[in-house]
Amino acid sequence: MCSISLHEYDHIYRESSHKNHKNSVSDIAFDWLETLILQRKRGEQEFLRHHHKSLQVRNFVGVLETPCGTIIEILPKTADTENPEADRALLLKMLNVVYKVKPRESTEASLETRQGSLLEILIARFLQEVSRIVHRGIRSDYVRIKEEAAFIKGRLRIAQQIRQPISRQHYFQIEYDKFLPDRAENRLIKAALRVVGKSSQQMENQRLARELLFVFDAIPCSTQINRDFSRWSTQRDMVHYRPVKPWVELILMRETPWFLQGKWQGISLLFPMEKLFESYLEFLLRRQLLPTYELVPQSTLHSLLRHNDKAMFQLKPDMCIRQGRDTKLVLDAKWKRLERDIDKYGLSQGDFYQMFAYGQKYLEGVGNMLLIYPKTPQFETTLAPFHYDEKLTVWVVPFCLERDELLCPDNMLPRFFLSTLTLNKGDNRE
């Protein structure tokens, strides 16, 4: 197995033509990645794009494993200087918040020191959670057993017994309940253990995966993933299973994009960076919102126009802050690097048309709106306001991912939030 680490919008090359390039992969892996481009259906998000003799990664981050065993790690690009360690830590922090896969404080430092790649860190965290379940005890449940026996046990299945051939009438068709660990949660965990056991290249992770698989040896693997997830119990005796559920969901690919669904079941944890940034902001802003306000994501109250008494072209801002039925503030998150030295700062005209529509429909043409971009060395403070007219204004605001600070004008945030500074304070608030 081999692995490469790259950033958003980097290029992947064939090893045969770019042998010494750090982003080169084997011809087999490159050909498989090309098939992903061909399989993409109309309207689906683009993960890779042909660029002459290379493949350019789009705005997806995470880990992808090819059938030949090549591990491709894609990290967010937030600065001019590439720092894989810092970018990996940032991605892990965002995943912890958005997907609620929070690490244990006592093991976090040791895991990140011991493991090099994002994949190994994620696998180690998952294995630690499964270990805690094993130490507290694997839960069992009553399972209905149907079998043919020489004696009656439980309940006789009368309809099946009547249909018994004469040669087997000395046997009984019975059914009974047996207390077994064969339940949906354990089947899913075992399926996830098998996946990570095949994908990990780190000796400690491989050893722990084998030990845990031995513990789950008597439990069958889940063959109907969606059905078993719907049966995941939330009862009090299963409370110690809750931390592992988000990990199992990620590993068994309930969150994966279109191009990873199929026969290949390797580790593939890829996330659209735009959506990840938006969800991360939503979580942090919601925690600091004053109790008199409500944060509504992806509001669908208004459409652009009506035709034959039907709404057309729904307007869905990323977030709205409401007080009762009144919308007080519209916020839209954009994962894009702005620069003060280039024309119009690199802002998109289409984004401002979109914000104008939001302002007219949600704010009735009066109020403030925020366009939030990640803070970079070229974009560290709020830009001068953009006025549609004297009543409707857009503020282009940086968000510092290192300190979780929304660097908004001081006269705006106190109206809605508990603090104008670190939005990630108070980890115990839900």
Image (tube, helix red, strand yellow):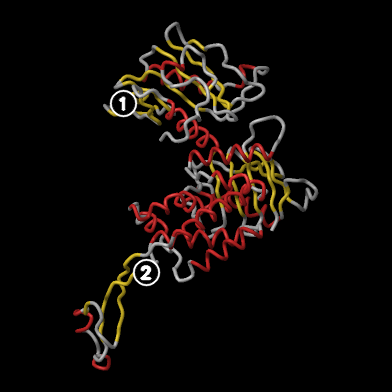
Placement of 140 over or under 243, stated as above or below: below
Please, which residue is most extreme toward the bottom here? Answer: 167
Within 10 Å of disc 2 (Cα), the crowding (few <14, some 14-19, many 20+) is some
| Relative image position of residue 245 (x, y in whole percent) | 44, 51
- On the image, the x and y values in percent for residue 371 come to 51, 22
Please provide percent x and percent y for residue 223: 43, 64
Q: Is residue 312 left or right of residue 174?
A: right
CB of mark 1 within 8 Å of CB of mark 2? no
In the depicted view, which residue is nearer to us: 88 or 327?
A: 88
Residue at 39% from the left image edge and 67% from the top image edge: 182
Q: Which residue is mark 2?
A: 180
Instruction: Say which quarter of the image contains residue 49.
Output: top right
Q: Which element type, helix, strand or loop, lies under badge 1?
A: strand
The residue tagged with tag 2: helix, strand or loop? strand
3D distance between C-alphas at marks 1 and 2: 59 Å
User: Which kind of residue does numbered mark 2 sit on?
Assistant: Leu
**What residue did someone put label 1 on?**
307
Residue at (41% x, 61% y) in the render: 224
- Amino acid, disc 1: His
Judge whether 103 appears above or below 374 on screen: below
Report crowding for label 1: few under 14, some 14 to 19, many 20 or more residues within 10 A (C-alpha).
few
Residue closer to the observer: 276 or 341: 276
The N terminus - image quarter: bottom right
- Compared to residue 38, the image places residue 398 above or below, namely above
- The mark closer to the camera, 1 or 2, is 2
Q: Is residue 332 above or below residue 245?
A: above
Q: Residue at x 57, y 16 (%)?
A: 382
Q: Which residue is farthest top?
A: 390
Where does the C terminus fall, quadrant-wise? Answer: top left
Q: Position of residue 302 (x, y in %)?
A: 34, 25
